[in-house]
């Protein structure tokens, strides 16, 4: 496998960190980004190998455009994301703006910054990290659902634009993953956190929470030679079109 340079947003923990670990193990150099400089440096030290850090807010459009263009990665994993619970009536515009900026606009800006290098090289892999919310509306998750649907649309549009140019764009869309975001959702259900997490996991077709390592493995499959001919695809993990999110009522 040819060694490449990979850029993983939101790479200091959870799915992003696990993805960086697998990419490093495959011989790639990796740049991880995140908001917290201390957490980033700690993650880099623990990961070891050829890893660099970029401390930045994914919603910082100007910073993202400049920094990512300078990095010029061959592989982009757009993983950074946030989420808030709320209905149309209860969601403040500030929450809406933050979710759209972090989950959608940051991915667009990142792709816009790195795509020229990929097209010039005639090779590139873009993987966006979606959610079941990219395909199934989440009760009391109005902004998050809208953002992940938009991210899926962005991924498909990039795939079409890059057709026959050596650049692929795909999404990995898991149900509830054992991450800080899922724990925050579980806390909204009330009661012991372990029981609340079990309720969320029970909604999955797997009957449990998905581990971040499992999502990372699927992400990295899209970056390898085994996926050279695959683009414009969303791999769903732990759910199907029959998923009932009504139990998420809080």
Image (cartoon, rainbow, N blue to C red):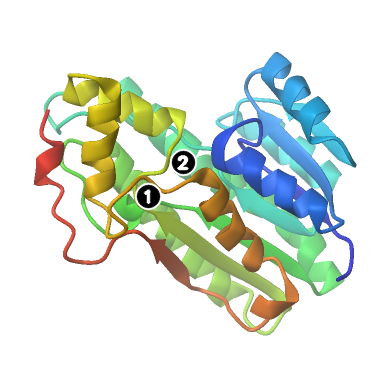
Q: Position of residue 237 (x, y in %)?
A: 39, 61
Q: Secondary structure at mark 1?
A: helix
Is disc 2 in contact with disc 1, using a CB cutoff of under 8 Å?
yes
Residue at 70%, 40% in the rendered image: 65
Residue at 30%, 27% in the rendered image: 194
What residue does disc 1 label? Answer: 148
Q: Is residue 46 above or below residue 203?
A: above
Tell me if residue 104 can be seen. yes
Residue at 36%, 33% in the rendered image: 182
The number of numbered badges drawn on the structure is 2
Which is more N-terminal, label 1 or label 2?
2
* Foreground pick, 24 / 64: 24
Question: In which quadrant of the rendered view does residue 92 lie?
Answer: top left
The Cα atoms of the two marked residues, 2 and 1, are separated by 7 Å
Tell me if residue 92 can be seen. no
Disc 1: CA contacts within 10 A as few (<14), some (14-19) or many (>=20): many
Q: Is residue 111 left or right of residue 212?
A: right
What residue does disc 2 label? Answer: 103
* Foreground pick, 167 / 220: 220
Q: Position of residue 173 (x, y in %)?
A: 42, 57
Residue at 21%, 66% in the rendered image: 241
Q: Quadrant of the C terminus?
A: top left
Q: Secondary structure at mark 2?
A: helix
Q: Is residue 89 above or below residue 16?
A: above
Q: Quadrant of the N terminus?
A: bottom right
Q: Is residue 63 above or below residue 153?
A: above
């Amino acid at each position: 496998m040819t060694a490449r340079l990979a850029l993983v947003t939101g790479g200091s923990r959870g799915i992003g960190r696990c993805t960086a670990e697998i990419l490093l193990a495959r011989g790639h150099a990796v740049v991880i980004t995140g908001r917290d400089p201390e957490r980033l440096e700690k993650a880099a030290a623990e990961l070891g190998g050829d890893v660099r850090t970029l401390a930045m807010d994914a919603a910082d459009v100007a910073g993202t455009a400049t920094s990512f263009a300078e990095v010029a990665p061959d592989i982009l994993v757009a993983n950074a994301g946030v989420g808030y619970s709320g209905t149309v009536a209860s969601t403040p515009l500030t929450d809406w703006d933050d979710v759209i900026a972090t989950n959608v606009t940051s991915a667009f800006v990142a792709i816009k910054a790195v795509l020229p290098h990929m097209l010039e090289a005639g090779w590139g892999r873009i993987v966006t990290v979606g959610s079941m919310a990219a395909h199934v509306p989440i009760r009391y998750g109005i902004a998050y659902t809208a953002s992940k649907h938009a991210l899926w649309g962005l991924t498909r549009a990039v795939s079409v634009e890059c057709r026959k140019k050596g650049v692929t764009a795909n999404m990995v869309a898991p149900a509830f993953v054992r991450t800080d975001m899922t724990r925050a959702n579980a806390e909204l259900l009330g009661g012991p956190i372990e029981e609340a997490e079990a309720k969320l996991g029970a909604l999955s077709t797997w009957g449990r929470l998905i581990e971040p390592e499992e999502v990372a493995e699927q992400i990295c499959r899209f970056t390898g030679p085994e996926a050279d001919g695959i683009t414009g695809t969303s791999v769903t993990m732990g759910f199907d079109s029959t998923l009932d999110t009504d139990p998420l009522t809080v």
